[in-house]
Amino acid sequence: MADLAIAPPRSSVIADAFLRHRLSWSDALIWLVGIAVYFVASEYLQLATQTVIMIIFALSLDLAIGYGGIESLGHAVFFGTGAYAAGSYALYVSSEPISGLVAGGLAAAVLGILSGLLILRVRGLTQVILTLAIATMLLQVATTAKSITGGDDGLTGYRIAPILGQFEFDLYGHTAYIYGLVILAVVFLFCRVLVNSPFGLTVRGIRDNPLRMRLLGVPVTARLLTLYTISAALAGVAGALSAQVTGLIGTDSLSFLLSGNVLIMLILGGIGRLSGAFLGATVFVVVSDRAAAIDPFNWLFVLGAMLILAVRFTPSGLTVVIDRLVARLSPGARRT
Amino acid sequence: MTELLRVEGLTAGYEDGTVVIEGISLSLGEGSTLALLGRNGVGKTTLLASIMGLTKIPDGRVTLQGRDITRRETHTRAFDGIGYVPQEREIFPSLTVEENLAVARARKGAWTLEAVYELFPRLAERRRNYGNQLSGGEQQMLAVGRALISNPVLLLLDEPFEGLAPVIVDQLAAAFDRIRNETGIATILVEHHAEIALSLAEQAIVLDRGQIVWAGDSATLLHDRAMLASLIGIDDAVAHEA
């Protein structure tokens, strides 16, 4: 009879997975653009920092939806929880920013476990409604618990200490941007490793066919709960980062609007590709900002039109269009 | 021969209350092969699904290596050593051949990636192709390989030859023959092609309307065309001779 120990991961599979998803020139380009923004568009650093935060948030949602097939319309609940946790941490425990991020991530992870136990029992529309219901309940709690969250006025008055005791947050957002960029790089590399790991393969298998994975001996609910918790933690980190760089947390950080926006970002960029989060969040934040600046009353029309056009002409996301263009230019290019 | 699987008075069906099989009892020894035959809709797949824990079992008991697994969850049964190759194959389209093989929660044993590639060289050639880029035959090889790589003690094969070209059927039959002769894996084979199933198995069971109507040596049934035709239907018997 076979040994009951689990066989070690097959190294060739993991190596192949990393090779197929290896860092490419397009990845390098993303980071070069990220660094270039700091030097050539310093007047837009606050907008760029918001973009970086939304990319992290979109990456977290991509893990849940794109890789695990977990439908969610309430992901802002983790973003908001992370934000309030980091704000409260700065207010009552320590103003040190890195541990504040960890606190935000942990608080969101705990909520991820608790809500995951409920929502992962079901799939499809029921799952969507449950995520929405949980987010709505938490929003109500945040609005009511004024002594903790500040209610509709928001949570303010906390101070964030210099990063590593050296880099003070400045009015122009230089430190905040670099800080956000570094956190994004760490989150991105973590996600990259995760989705290409044996764990990542199994959750992709679960997304394709959960029953089949069960037949292969995989504890499907436990794996999905792990993924959902990680996704929640990363959303919490994004929320914590937002709280730290803006110095204000409003109840809109838990809102359905934010949950919808981050989903639109993913749809725009491409779901289940990681790179889609970068492109989708950037396009969304920049177009929203410019449209609002040009026409403060009708800018949502521009967003709506952009989404309709994207879904109509690039249903798999803008990254797929770029991939096709690159493939056309270099026939040997492989799927990333 | 040591008993591997015992099914006692098994009644099973689905969540809506439908009962498909009733009072099924059978026993399977380690390393032996059982052919499960019958017309369409008599409960062959339901019996396999029940052994795998995919049905509602109001009555009866399933034991594997002496341990009662009747109420165990499906993924735990798989890790206990039951490999299941469903009729639909269910290859993961977004994973490569190698990744499809790697996602199984493997127990240590003789069946490694290399051993599967040695059994099905075609899979080695296609190891970097995605699941949705494979032919039907390649998908079936992958489905079997994926079940083997978890090093099962019992393999459940549901219509593994369905819809495949004769040359692929021959390759798969040869592979099953090797699995039977060279490893200690016991197999329950549900197959519409009765002659192939009977030639691969030592024992056979025929189901009708959810109950066992015949059980015995495969050879007996294989050589008695009249009995075979009466048990599984005239059309099927003609099809086998064709």
Image: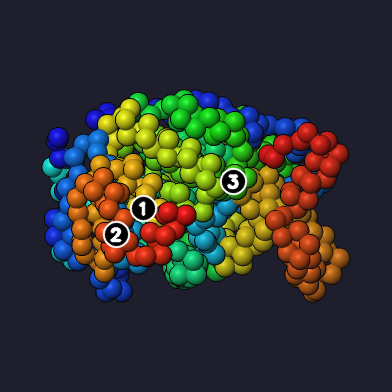
Q: Which of marks 3 and 2 precedes in the sequence? A: 3
Marks 1/2 in contact by CB < 8 Å: the verdict is no
**Viewer-proximal residue among A76 and B37:** B37
Whole-percent x and y of residue A87?
A: 51, 51
Tell me the amino acid under the disc marked 1.
Answer: Ala
Tell me the amino acid under the disc marked 3.
Answer: Ser
**Viewer-proximal residue among B214 and A237:** B214
Tell me how far mark 2 sits from mark 3, CA to CA: 36 Å
Q: Residue at x 20, y 61 (%)?
A: B212
Front disc: 2 or 3: 2
Q: Which quarter shows the C terminus of chain A? A: top right
Mark 3 belongs to chain: B
Q: Which quarter shows the N terminus of chain A? A: top left
Q: Residue at x 76, y 58 (%)?
A: A314
The residue to which callout 2 is attached is B226
Tell me how far mark 1 sits from mark 3, CA to CA: 24 Å
Q: Residue at x 54, y 64 (%)?
A: A73
The residue to which callout 3 is attached is B135
Whole-percent x and y of residue A208?
A: 51, 52
**Residue B65 placement: quadrant:** top left
Q: Is residue A178 left or right of residue B147?
A: right
Tell me the amino acid under the disc marked 2.
Answer: Ala
Front disc: 1 or 3: 1
Secondary element at image label 3: loop
Whole-percent x and y of residue A109?
A: 43, 49
Q: Tell me: residue A72, above or below residue A202.
A: below
Tell me how far mark 1 sits from mark 2, CA to CA: 13 Å
Secondary element at image label 1: helix
The residue to which callout 1 is attached is B194
Mark 2 belongs to chain: B
